Amino acid sequence: MLRLKIIPVLLLVALTALAQRSMTVAEVTTFVRSQIKMKGDDRMTADFLHKIKLTQKLDDKTVEDLQGLGAGSKTVAALRKLEEESAGLAAAPPPPVAAPRPVKPPPDSMEQAEALAAMREYALNYTAKLPNYLCVQITRRHLDPKDPKYRAAGDVIQEQLAFNDRKESYKVQMINGQAVHNISHEQLGGVRSSGEFGSMLHNIFVPEDEAQFDWDHWGTLRGKPMYVFAYRIEKDHGYSMYDDETKKQYTSAYTGLVYADVETKEIERITLKTVGIPADFPVKDVALTLDYKPTEIAGRIFTLPFHYELDSVHVRGNSKNEAEYKLYQVYGADTTITFEDAGPTPEDQLKEQPAKPVTPAVKKKP
């Protein structure tokens, strides 16, 4: 701990030796940013700034940006003094703009058509190729009410999810770490969802739902390159919502993205966002992301859901549900799974990485 505390002081001592020389705006900005990051002493930072001479004009925006990053009052006062003293100097040149990195062009129309055909075949046969299994679903729910007289609320729901004969069923096991009995999934109240395992994937690609697909971008998930296609489904085949309090129901058109492994064409992420919800319906917006990954069941590998996030905007408040699927195993009518929650899914398993840029070909001289 002692070493960490003295690092800013040592940096100041080292720089003070050079304090009599002139500095550019970029050098001053870099110094102040470093002091902010290392929580350097405000008075000592200001003392150093009082001893330098700028070679360029320090503008008001730069000072305000540094103040916004956390520069102390004495440091800001010293910067304002430098701003006044340098007012007659030439403005600092703009920072150099990095050359744009080459971007991989979209696949041609034939490759897109072939990829979509393979993705459709995979989606429509997805549940048929799955075994009957059980897993644990841990859902973390949080509600942020719009009325300030209500406090934010949340809970953690543990359920055993059974997938048997291509149908899902839920058995609530624990709420906030306490075992419960005879409470159904529908009796949980609050925001809840079902059907993520196969029906969502099926509905996007089934011909009857008439989804419209367009190329969106190259992506990378969990280190693997992905085709990413945008889609839209109209309300006739849309996303169904029901409000417990008003007993109102509405089916919304929705849009989203589908991520498929470039090599296998297996789908590893689906996103969904409702569009065109009428003003008088209590749910204003729903967005959902479902992630899949290869998972072992009884010695075989299947690509199965492992995380989903559901965000909804309601007249009464905003809600966020995050769920993890764990401990997949072969289905048995009398089997029960219990385990200790290990916490949320790591962020690096969910964040999309940018597509790798194209490396320009280098021509060899003859």
Image: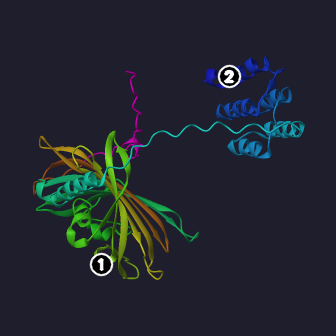
**In this rendering, does residue 27 appear at all?**
yes
Figure check: 43 above or below 109: above
Q: Which residue is mark 2?
A: 6
Please give the label number shown on residue 236.
Answer: 1
Residue displayed at 79% across by 39% down: 91
Boundaries of the magenta span: 339-366
User: On the rendered image, what quadrant is the C terminus found in?
Assistant: top left
Sequence-earlier tag: 2 or 1:
2
| Residue type, mark 1 in image | Asp
Residue displayed at 76% across by 37% down: 92
| Residue type, mark 2 in image | Ile
**To which quarter of the image does residue 112 belong?**
bottom left
**To which quarter of the image does residue 162 belong?**
bottom left
Q: Position of residue 114 (x, y in %)?
A: 22, 54
Left or right of 328? Residue 13 is: right
Q: Main secondary structure of the magenta part?
A: loop
Colouring: rainbow
Left or right of 279? Residue 15 is: right
